[in-house]
């Protein structure tokens, strides 16, 4: 008899509800963590460096309207960090879950090392789905960020953003350059995520193989 825990949800509506619930939770978690990090970093910088706090942190104001290395600006940073990280985290999960959802059952491995104990389930990662999700979000963020600089009319002054051309050949602070850079960033994100997922899956399988050997 097959273990029912390894079967994907039979009801597509139920699966959608699960995905959306997890999307909201992940978005709130990512958003709060990123926004909180900006808030705390700004206040710490103000406390430790005083007037010099804005030397580097003020660069965030290029992408976060209203942000500055001040107590009030820190809360603007919290808001934008929450929005951007929350949207990014939610989109990553949506893309990943929709891409890997059809193969959900294949992504679960059962550890049978202890026959008299409940069998723990370990979720394996889909390298293709994870790579697609991470790569797509990185590319979208670069294109949107660059487009924002162009629309603001500060593209020529964005010397720090232009430094990305050293890592993304063909990138420039322009819409065509953003598309080229987005392709490179997608490739980097996909390759890293695919490698990470496969290394993770390999270690999980090796651990379970060792557990089975010890159980004998």
Image (tube, rainbow, N blue to C red):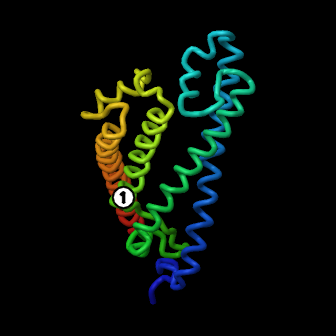
Tell me the element at label 1.
Answer: helix
Q: In the figure, is residue 145 to the left or right of 69? A: left
User: Relative to residue 106, is residue 81 depicted above or below?
Assistant: above
Image quarter for residue 56?
Answer: top right
Q: Nearer the viewer, residue 33 or 78?
A: 78
Residue 39 locus on image (x, y percent) = 68, 31
**Point 50% across, 56% down: residue:** 91
**Point 50% across, 59% down: residue:** 93
**Point 40% across, 69% down: residue:** 107
Residue 179 locus on image (x, y percent) = 33, 43
User: Relative to residue 12, is residue 122 depicted above or below?
Assistant: above
Residue located beneath label 1 in the image: 201
Q: How many marks?
A: 1
Residue 130 locus on image (x, y percent) = 39, 57
Q: Nearer the viewer, residue 123 or 116?
A: 123
User: Relative to residue 50, is residue 81 depicted above or below?
Assistant: below
Q: Which quadrant would the N terminus be assigned to in this image?
A: bottom left
**Point 54% across, 28% down: residue:** 62
The crowd level at tag 1 (other Cα within 10 Å; few <14, some 14-19, many 20+) is many
């Amino acid at each position: 008899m097959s273990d029912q825990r390894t079967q994907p949800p039979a009801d597509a509506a139920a699966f959608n509800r699960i995905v959306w619930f997890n999307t909201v939770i992940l978005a709130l978690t990512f958003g709060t963590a990123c926004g909180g990090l900006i808030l705390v970093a700004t206040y710490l910088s103000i406390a430790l460096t005083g007037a010099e706090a804005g030397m580097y942190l003020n660069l965030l104001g290029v992408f976060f309207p209203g942000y500055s290395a001040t107590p009030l600006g820190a809360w603007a940073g919290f808001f934008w960090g929450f929005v951007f990280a929350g949207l990014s985290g939610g989109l990553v999960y949506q893309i990943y879950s929709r891409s890997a959802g059809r193969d959900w059952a294949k992504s679960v491995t059962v550890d049978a090392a202890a026959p008299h104990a409940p069998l723990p389930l370990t979720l394996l990662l889909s390298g293709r789905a994870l790579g697609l999700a991470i790569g797509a979000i990185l590319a979208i963020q670069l294109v949107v960020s660059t487009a924002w600089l162009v629309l603001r009319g500060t593209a020529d002054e964005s010397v720090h953003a232009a430094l990305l051309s050293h890592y993304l050949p063909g990138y420039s602070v322009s819409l065509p350059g953003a598309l080229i850079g987005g392709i490179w960033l997608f490739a980097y994100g996909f390759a890293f995520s695919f490698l990470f997922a496969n290394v993770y899956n390999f270690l999980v399988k090796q651990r379970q193989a060792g557990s089975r050997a010890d159980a004998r």
